Amino acid sequence: MIFSSYEFIFVFLPITFLVYFFLVGRRLLQAARVWLVLSSLFFYGWWDVNYLPLILGSMLFNFALGAELARPFNVRRKKGIERKGLLVFGIAANLGLLGYFKYVDFFLVNFNVLFDVGLGLTSIALPLAISFFTFQQIAYLVDCYRCEVKESDFLSYALFVTFFPQLIAGPIVHHKEMMPQFASRWNAVKRYRNVALGLFVFSIGLFKKVVVADTFAVWATAGYDGGVALSFTEAWATSLSYTFQLYFDFSGYTDMAIGIALLFNIRLPINFYSPYKALSIQDFWRRWHITLSRFLRDYLYIPLGGSRQGKVRMYINLFVTFLLGGLWHGASWMFVLWGAMHGVALVLHRFWQNMGVSLPNWFAWVLTFNFVNATWVLFRAPDMASALTVYRGMLGVSSWQLAPLPDWPRSFVVGVTRYYEHFETWLWVSLALLAVLCLNNSAHYLRGWRMEMRHALLAGLSLAFSISQLSSYSEFIYFNF
């Protein structure tokens, strides 16, 4: 079940919403929480019921360990090294579970190649959302160790982990961000402004996914998976199509998650804030998957030493953080290389900053956007051969040798012809670029918003047109991570 499906929009979401507020209206608050947890587990189990024991076991383990770390007796009496040992054990267990399901075959393949052996692969299917709920629970353990949270109620903890709007692909939330909202009496009533705003944001997100992202997906797939050489215009159309597919896919999911949570009076943290407006690679990562960037900063970059141990160590920490951030996205050398490229870019950006030199805004944007577009090729391509096919086309070279000087009149005619063959693609690319640069991010509406006729019309048209396009199954890209 995905947000952009008939069963979710017309069956699961309405039933979950109505029963929840029916129970809340009868002041059966614990029953309402139980209902929300069970609904979230049903939503998760819809994909593969066999993985329900996995997420339940993970929650029980982390809840018990977190309670032990946060117990006042342990905080006062246990030596620091003993509590730290518990924390290290918990983090290692979580990463071990993630590594087994996500990376074991990756390491076996590379081990076989490196040592010329033939160890058999496990061919284990990746459990949905394991990367997200693992990181979320690691953050919880660290916060318990720091005495920043204390949860004595397993039902509340289960709701924190499984709340279905953010369960599958984030945002990666903190306990202290979520549970005070569920505990608030003010949120235990149906708030019609939140319902209206939630439906508005959900409708915009659905339109982004179903109409825009899935349209770009057709052109991106044809270029990346077609197995043929690409001309200059075809390669750029391919790379830009995926750049905008990923943008509207992830932005659409984020909007839908925020909108659904608002129906239950819950405000999820902003996870996506117009990243293609960024004027530097650092600015980009402050806008793209914000909660993942926050997690990597707080639980990896800073513990490694951050910028406290000199510039050279800071550069190394930046690079390592994004190298591992790339590996988090998937068990593939393509993701590792993508992360390494962003790590190098952040190191160069920090070095440039330390020199006190600035670029004109227009040039900084062109440089940042084109770097991001170029590195998304590594993110999308199934292998290096496919990535090189796209890069060769984008550079206008053949076999990495400069092509002979063209017959300009004939070349011009051929170029114009090829452009018009892809006219629809370029029109969509142009409109998408204008949209991401000129229109407000959905987060703009989360404060001071009020329903107006134009909002109602926009939401109604977006929802109606999107539902009319729900003709095929299309997962969100980040579901694969």
Image (cartoon, grey):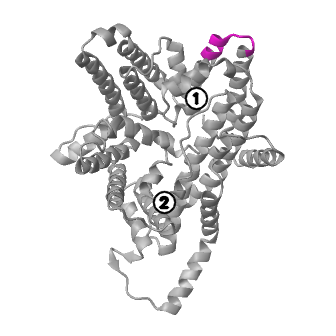
Q: Amino acid at mark 1?
A: Phe
- Position of residue 302 relative to residue 94, above or below, is below
Q: Judging from the image, what secondary structure is the residue with disc 2 in?
A: loop
Q: Residue at x 47, y 24 (%)?
A: 50
- Name which residue lies at 63% across and 39% down: 256
Q: Is residue 7 left or right of residue 452?
A: left
Q: Nearer the viewer, residue 471 or 460?
A: 460
- Above or below — where is 207 with respect to 21? below
Q: Residue at x 44, y 88 (%)?
A: 406
Counting residues from the start of the chain, the first of labels 2 and 1 encountered is 1
Residue 471 in sight: no
Image disc number at residue 164: 1
Frontmost residue, 435 versus 378: 435
Q: Which quadrant of the structure image shows residue 189?
A: top right
Instruction: Name the residue that disc number 2 marks.
Output: 279
User: Which residue: 59% across, 32% down?
Assistant: 165
Q: Can you name the residue that lies furthest to the right here?
A: 453
What segment is highlighted magenta in the picture?
25-34
The image shows residue 218 at horizontal and vertical percentages of 57, 57
**Secondary structure mainly formed by the magenta segment:** helix
Circle 2 Cα neighbour tier, 10 Å, few/some/many (<14 / 14–19 / ≥20): many
Q: Is residue 72 left or right of residue 461?
A: left
In the displayed structure, 33 sits above or below 108; it is above
